[in-house]
Image (cartoon, grey):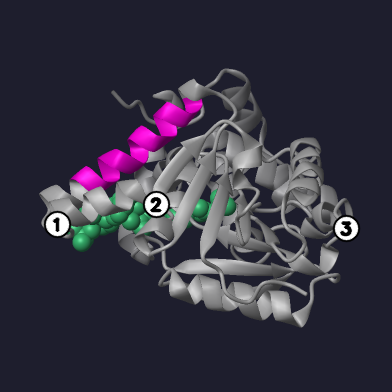
Amino acid sequence: MAVTAIRSVGVVGCGLMGSGIAQTCVQAGYEVVVREVSEELLHKGLQRIYEAWEMLVSKGRVSREQAEEYRQRLRGTVALEELASCDLVIEAVVERMEEKLRLFTALDRLLKPEALIVSNTSSLSVTQMAAVTRRPQQVCGLHFFNPAPVMKLVEIVRPITASEETIETVRRFAESLGKTPVLAKDTAGFIVNFLLIPYLLSAIRMLENGMASRDDIDTAMKLGCGYPMGPFTLLDYVGLDTTLWAAEAIYEEYKEPLYAPPPLLRRMVAAGLLGRKSGRGFYEYS
Ligand code: CAA
């Protein structure tokens, strides 16, 4: 029997997505424990969250007291065991299946039997993650978009093993975060990345083929389609490594040339040009 009332939330991973997700959950009123693998990464992730709250205070969106109260409901740790009493745990670690499977196995051993485990994966199989646990009916995907505190959408990803009760509880949880959930089957890319990844890869191919410049492609999509960011700005924002992993996962499933990562993307990731987070991608950041 799965929990139906979520009070405490665990987030595993405090990178770009994990920190945004933890921040979102705290702001919605939950007690949150976030876990990173090292003190250094934990500090960096927590700093990102504290800076976001400082920004909200400086804009007058939340009071100083409210921001202080947020800080008190957020706890950082490097020990997975500290998530043991959580009602729901959100996995937001690196997009590598071996990592996810190791983590799901460990969480399953640690958590109370009724707790739910959800994955923020953008394209890997949630069914495979559910299958290494003894609670596959209580596992599904909950995919946030970057920046998590701002983007209104979440994709609820339904593995064939998930119970109706789990999907309903996660849907209510997503709504309590102020998000609009959509439901997708557990197929690579779900809804958004199935459509977004070929668009981003096509922009890279246009650049590789010299069809137009980086700036003109970005300007064209911003002003011609009303997108908030052009494809290269968005690639840098999402992270080139994340985009590559998503493309590989979808290509692996469908073998459609549309999803095959272009050589330039592979070379840039190999060179450590990952976008904003590494200081350089298609653009440079100081
Ligand atoms: N916490 C709380 N609020 C935040 C925030 C944070 N961390 N970051 C930004 N905000 C708020 C700002 O305070 C601001 O609020 P107000 O309008 O009330 O002042 C608002 O968000 C907009 O921020 P900015 O003014 O700084 O910047 P902007 O207007 O240029 O918008 C953007 C920035 C929201 C990122 C916008 O450019 C955008 O929507 N870009 C597209 C992002 C996108 O497509 N994301 C999906 C990527 S795909 C993905 O994530 C899935 C995957 O698996 C790869």
Q: Which numbered disc flags the more N-terminal residue, 1 or 3? A: 1
The residue depicted at 14 percent of the width and 57 percent of the height is: 63
Residue picked out by circle 2: 23
- Cα gap from disc 1 to disc 3, whole angstroms: 44 Å
Residue picked out by circle 1: 63
Name which quarter of the figure residue 285 lies in. Answer: top left
- Cα gap from disc 1 to disc 2, whole angstroms: 16 Å
Residue type at mark 3 is Arg
Left or right for 172, reference 146:
right
Is the CB of the residue bearing disc 2 within 8 angstroms of ligand 1? yes
The residue depicted at 75 percent of the width and 58 percent of the height is: 188
Residue type at mark 2 is Gln
Please give the label number shown on residue 45: none
Q: Which numbered disc flags the more N-terminal residue, 3 or 2? A: 2
Q: Residues within 10 Å of mark 1 (few under 14, many from 20)?
A: some
Q: Position of residue 95 (x, y in %)?
A: 68, 41
Residue type at mark 1 is Ser
Choose between 157 and 199: the one closer to the eye: 157
Q: Position of residue 259 (x, y in %)?
A: 71, 50
Instruction: Please give the range of residues in magenta.
Output: 41-54
Magenta segment, prevailing SS (helix, strand or loop):
helix
User: Split into 4 quadrants, where in the image is the N terminus?
Assistant: bottom right
Choose between 148 and 162: the one closer to the eye: 162
Regarding mark 3 in the picture, which secondary structure is present there? Answer: loop
Check contact, mark 1 vs mark 3: CB within 8 A.
no
Name which quarter of the figure residue 185 lies in. Answer: bottom right
Membership of 259 in magenta stretch: no
Membership of 52 in magenta stretch: yes
Check contact, mark 3 vs mark 2: CB within 8 A.
no
Regarding mark 1 in the picture, which secondary structure is present there? Answer: loop
